[in-house]
Image (spheres, rainbow, N blue to C red):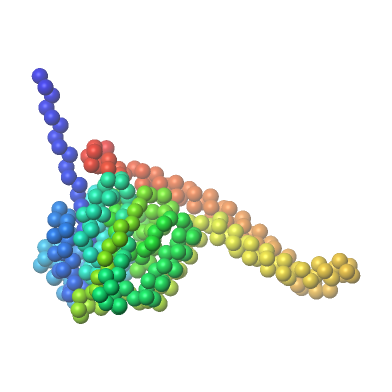
């Protein structure tokens, strides 16, 4: 007697998560594009306390709408990953500037490669010079290069708001940022846990007529730069405090050089306050290095805990092969 066939595994649960603030003119277009390109996805719109009809338009288009009172894209991302339960998450801004034609390919790339993140790297459609301004592109290259130099990785568009995540990424991401610096955190989280990731070029489109960008070039650029610095200190404390110790030591050597020359020539130390300052500077440098060593031990333990949390969640390919109960 033949054994009964095992029941087929359930399909992947795909969730489209869309952060929105005053995007009534664009959100309907984004939902429609998702339905056309990825009809199996469940669409969730997270309205960040909009003052226009964003929530009503999204609800009328059939999306699940969640209101997030705390202002800022980072606060919205925290709610998205906490509230939505799925195997694959597709995050895209609600301003209709990302071409969703490649979204199925991005999901397939995530699953086939058992990846944790696929980033849609923006490529200007060249229809409007204001779509992806030269200053924004320069700032993006500058900040992306800074992250690459500090944390490694080969991203070309770290600040893209168009990404596909695995469940184990979403449920292991702490989301500490409040605003547009969330993309920096998303990138560094993947690099610090050495997650498999990929990039796929996608067209960057003009905003619908009448809608306005919420990005403040200088204010948000400064916040992103501060976030990179904060993450460098918290994730690479030994490197950061070693740099501080090196600079302090170099400054002490500059201060003490004429004193040493005078002492060797005359046997006297005529500028005692300068000698005391140089000695104190070296002591601070040594203290900085010790702080880096101690904090590095703490950081390694924290990274191990995050890694264990990450490993406790099945990868997307495991869900495809074995189901969710592995």
- Residue at the top extreme? 1
Can you tell which quarter of the image residue 177 is in? bottom left
Q: Is residue 66 visible in this depiction of the protein?
A: no
Q: Quadrant of the N terminus?
A: top left
Q: Position of residue 14 (x, y in %)?
A: 20, 52
Front residue of 11 and 289: 11
Q: Position of residue 146 (x, y in %)?
A: 47, 64
Can you tell which quarter of the image residue 214 is in? bottom left
Q: Quadrant of the C terminus?
A: top left
Residue at (16, 63) in percent of width and height:
33
Q: Is residue 183 visible in this depiction of the protein?
A: yes
- Residue at the right extreme? 266
Residue at (30, 45) in percent of width and height:
114
Front residue of 301 and 109: 109
Q: Position of residue 277 (x, y in %)?
A: 72, 70
Q: Position of residue 175 (x, y in %)?
A: 35, 59
- Residue at the bottom extreme? 210
Front residue of 299 and 240: 240
Residue at (25, 42) in percent of width and height:
319
Residue at (64, 62) in percent of width and height:
246
Tally of numbered tags: 0
Can you tell which quarter of the image residue 220 is in? bottom left
């Amino acid at each position: 007697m033949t054994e009964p066939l095992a029941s087929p595994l359930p399909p992947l649960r795909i969730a489209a998560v869309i952060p929105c603030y005053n995007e009534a003119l664009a959100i309907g277009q984004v939902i429609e594009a998702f339905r056309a390109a990825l009809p199996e996805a469940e669409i969730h719109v997270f309205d960040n306390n909009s003052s226009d009809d964003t929530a009503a338009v999204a609800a009328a288009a059939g999306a699940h709408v969640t209101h997030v009172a705390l202002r800022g894209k980072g606060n919205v991302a925290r709610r998205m990953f906490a509230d939505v339960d799925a195997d694959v998450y597709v995050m895209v801004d609600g301003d209709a500037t990302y071409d969703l034609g490649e979204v199925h390919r991005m999901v397939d790339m995530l699953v086939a490669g058992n990846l944790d993140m696929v980033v849609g790297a923006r490529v200007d459609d060249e229809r409007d010079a204001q779509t992806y301004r030269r200053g924004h592109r320069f700032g993006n290259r500058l900040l992306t290069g800074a992250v690459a130099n500090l944390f490694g990785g080969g991203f070309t568009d770290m600040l893209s708001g168009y990404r596909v995540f695995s469940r184990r990424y979403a449920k292991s991401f702490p989301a500490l940022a409040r605003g547009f610096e969330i993309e920096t955190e998303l990138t560094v989280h993947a690099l610090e846990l050495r997650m498999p990731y990929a990039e796929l070029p996608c067209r960057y489109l003009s905003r619908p007529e009448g809608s306005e960008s919420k990005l403040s070039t200088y204010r948000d650029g400064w916040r992103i730069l501060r976030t990179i610095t904060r993450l460098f200190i918290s994730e690479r404390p030994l490197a950061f405090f070693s740099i501080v110790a090196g600079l302090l030591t170099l400054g002490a050597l500059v201060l003490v050089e004429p004193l040493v020359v005078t002492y060797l020539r005359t046997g006297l130390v005529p500028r005692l306050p300068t000698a005391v300052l140089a000695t104190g500077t070296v002591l601070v440098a040594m203290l900085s290095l010790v702080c880096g060593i101690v904090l590095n031990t703490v950081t390694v333990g924290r990274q191990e805990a995050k890694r264990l949390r990450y490993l406790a969640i099945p990868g997307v390919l495991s869900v495809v092969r074995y189901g969710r109960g592995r």
